[in-house]
Image (cartoon, grey):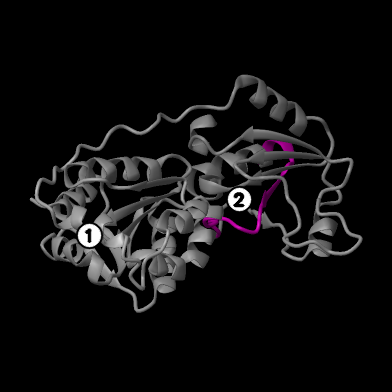
Amino acid sequence: MNGAESLIRTLIAGGVDTCFTNPGTSEMHIVAALDHAPEVRCVLGLFEGVVTGAADGYARMTEKPACTLLHLGPGFANGVANLHNASRAQVPMVNLVGQHPAYHLRYDAPLTSDIEAISRPYSKWLRTSASSPELGRDAAQAIVAARTAPGQIATLVVPADVAWTEGGVVAQIPAGPPATSPPSESVNHAVSMVRSGLPAALLLTGNALYDEGLEVAGRIAAATGAKLLAPYPIVRVQRGAGIPSVQRIPYMPEQAAEFLKGIRKLILIGAAAPVSYFAYPGKSSVLTSPECVKSILWRGLEKITSAH
């Protein structure tokens, strides 16, 4: 078994069953391994921006890591815009990026680049595999990193010789970090805020915007009168008859400031305090009023629904 085969078999063991691809020569051994793995559905994109965008959408809807296969640093760079969006929305993703063998890098071939430097801003977990026997282990750790709540991007750089060399080992998937609840003092503070009698709102993100998370948030809103809000960048939001209504903070700063001006208590549930997307002359970057008190209930280190 070569490294590429151990990589794909480890991904399968970790529940990764769909790979969005735009490969090149350096990734051909990974392509061959995928071709021999009917458990993985491969989706070819003709541009890396399509690949990363499709993977982003797939992971948002399935709540499991999407996999991409990209061609060296330039291929990764072509997909960065959608990886930025996925990173901001805390979407689980495993990127596989080909790389030249170490002995070839010194020749500075036309597509040589510093892949780690390009991918670091968009990857919460990043590693370049050093050998074929370690590739399966690296893939397992990438899956765990991507699954770490609420979701994040893991990028695994695979040198071509690591992929084609024999000695690959399928790794077991280690247990991820357990879901935890917010500190009791944070919960008590949030309760006092929504019961203060002042206009209050919950600013929700992640899985608080659909299914059980939204149901819990809706019960809180019904009992306290607090509004349910969502920032502009989110994974997704559930809508329909009988589903609690969530209002999206407007994109334009003037509209957002007007929308938020009456809120006096704002509880942040996985979301950051709302700020303007861009700077404007003579205008504050902070969208809430100076009288608004903010409190962090959940920082994004656990499943929101574990805290209700």
| Extreme residue in the top direction | 184
Please, what is the three-letter code of the amino acid marked with disc 1? Ala
What is the magenta range? 222-239
Picture coordinates of residue 193 (x, y %)?
76, 31
Picture coordinates of residue 294 (x, y %)?
76, 37
**Nearer to us in this view, 245 or 291:** 291
Determine whether, in the image, residue 148 is placed left or right of residue 89: left
Picture coordinates of residue 18 (x, y %)?
27, 60
- What residue is shown at x 22% (from left), y 59% (from top)? 160
- What residue is shown at x 27% (from left), y 52% (from top)? 16
- What residue is shown at x 33% (from left), y 68% (from top)? 71
| Secondary-structure class at tag 1 | helix
Picture coordinates of residue 125 (x, y %)?
42, 44
Classify 200 as above or below 253.
Answer: above
Classify 306 as above or below 89.
Answer: above
- Observer-side mark, 1 or 2, equals 1
Label 2 packing within 10 angstroms: few (<14), some (14-19), many (20+)? many
| Secondary-structure class at tag 2 | loop
| Extreme residue in the front direction | 107
Q: Say which residue label 2 marks.
A: 244
236 in the magenta segment: yes
Classify 68 as above or below 127.
Answer: below
N-terminal of the pair, mark 1 or mark 2, is 1
The kind of secondary structure the magenta stretch mainly shows is loop
How far apart marks 1 and 2 lie (CA) works out to: 50 Å
